[in-house]
Image (tube, grey):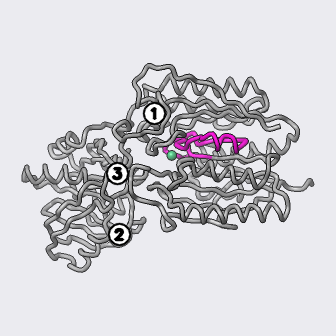
Amino acid sequence: MSKPYRIAVGGFHIECSEFTPYRSGEAAFRVRRGQELLDSHPWITGDTSAIDAARLERFGAIERIEGVEWVPLTYAGALPGGPVTNEFFSAWLDEFCTLLEQAHNEEPLDAVLLTIHGAASVVDLEDGEGVIASRVRQIVGKDVPIAASMDLHGCISDLLFESCDLLTCYRTAPHIDVPWTHERAARALIKVLDNPGRTLYRARVNVPVLLPGEKTSTEVEPGASMYAKLGVYQLQDDVFDTSIWMGFPWADMERCHGAVVSYGYDEQAVRDAAMAAAQDFWDNAGVFEFVGPTDTAEGSVAQALSAEVSPFFVSDTGDNPGAGGTDDSTVFLREILDAYRAQGSTKRVVFASLNDPAAVEACEQAGVGAPVRLAVGAMNGGVSGEPVMMDGVVDRLFDEYRSGGKSAVIAEGNFKVIVTTARTQFGCSEQYEAAGTPFDAEDIVVVKMGYLEPDLSAAAKGWVMALTPGAVDQDLPRLGHHKIMRPLYPFDELPFDPHLTVDLLERA
Ligand SMILES: [Zn+2]
């Protein structure tokens, strides 16, 4: 048997809204190293027990990749948040590069596989992934192929495109094909190693479109057809793979726009594949719609307070922590609480939730049942608004098991606000039960989220996505981008000439 290929694997995964003073530091990240890193990839272990049967049915079995010695570097992953602190990123990158150098010096690596998001903004650095990939290139040299397996909401900067030989991304949003994407990148690397001496071409076409997350679902049209055309697996000789990046809208950088990358051995076919997918994306630019009903903040409050069904859900989309919201914005809380008080409403409302450790502590000190008068939320200031005064009682103290930690419920009459010690998202029914606010006990559930997670969507008798301002405002043009490419839809009105052109690079 021939000697196994020696392939290093590691990466960095976070998406960062730049429209927030919140920073993602060490505490926000979970770092995997060694065996733990390898065990997180079913195509390395062959163990698919963590993947549900429906997905295996849909995307096919994942087989263990044979004939490779996988060399674990380090992988840091976090919930979406604000820009990464320079301190944490530098420390992580130093460790990553040291491990890579050691591995390469010990015995030359044949390839490197990076699993990265593509929207890591780093304080004073911006293009986190481009920096990672270019450092890898410096260390391993031009002959060792590098693959990047990414989130479709990531971005392809020039530096990233130049530094990686193969770039691919998820084909589903919500992202249910993550391990299959990484596996596809790994198998493409092996194909390159199996064919030494063949020239590999890669083509990129930038697409001047930048959509908010709640418009990029691949479960509905036009996203469903656009991504279905790419096929789940290709790896044919002429074109191995074509992928479409929607880009990341909540950062103000040159790299933030749509892109398509194809790669393979046939230069013309690679060019044509990239251009065809880019043209398709462009032709659909104005067709993408929000995945659910939307309204202004004011309109959503009116809908909720007058709804004749219970529970009625409102997504506070501008502060969705699942996309990078600060989780402490009071902009929508103030809107609905003012109207609630003015109308003398007695509807049962739960606001889930506000990250405010000081408020949790004040509630703990007061004790359950004690009256409290507290200014809550907006500790980040800026897009988070101003603290809101609650005049009520401590309804409950509990532990929010997902990531919120010690938490409290403040009740002003029938209006309840959940405050948590750390950022979290109330995405499943158990969390509401722990807070003493199960769905069937509420008339209105306000949640910091975009489209509803399955438990919420199953319980909702009515729903609106409130297009609230915030760190992840779905109304992109009002955020005030300055560095993005122009023209760019929807910052510029259609129609305009997209100037679709192919950037071609080759690996000899
Ligand atoms: Zn994504």
The amino acid type, in three-letter code, at marker 1 is Val
Task: Identify the element where label 2 is drawn.
Answer: loop
Image point (60%, 44%), residue name: 57
- Left or right, residue 173 beside residue 355: right
- Left or right, residue 167 beside residue 317: right
- Left or right, residue 80 beside residue 94: left
Q: Is mark 2 within 8 Å of ligand 1?
A: no
Q: Is residue 209 visible?
A: yes
Q: How many residues crowd around disc 1 within 10 Å: few (fewer than 14), some, or many (20 or more)?
A: some
Earlier residue among tags 1 and 3: 1
Q: How many residues crowd around disc 2 within 10 Å: few (fewer than 14), some, or many (20 or more)?
A: many
Q: CA distance from mark 1 to mark 3?
A: 24 Å
Report which quarter residue 214 is drawn in.
Answer: top left
Q: Which residues are magenta?
A: 150-176
Earlier residue among tags 3 and 2: 3
Q: Is residue 54 visible?
A: no
Judge whether 487 appears above or below 34 on screen: above
Image point (70%, 44%), residue name: 164
Which label belongs to residue 501?
none
The amino acid type, in three-letter code, at marker 3 is Asp
Image point (74%, 23%), residue name: 268
Which label belongs to residue 319?
3
Report which quarter residue 46 is drawn in.
Answer: bottom right
Which circle, 1 or 3, is nearer the viewer?
3
Q: Which residue is tagged 1?
A: 220
The amino acid type, in three-letter code, at marker 2 is Thr
Earlier residue among tags 2 and 1: 1
Q: Which residue is tagged 2?
A: 421
> Looking at the rendering, in which quadrant would you find the C terminus?
top right
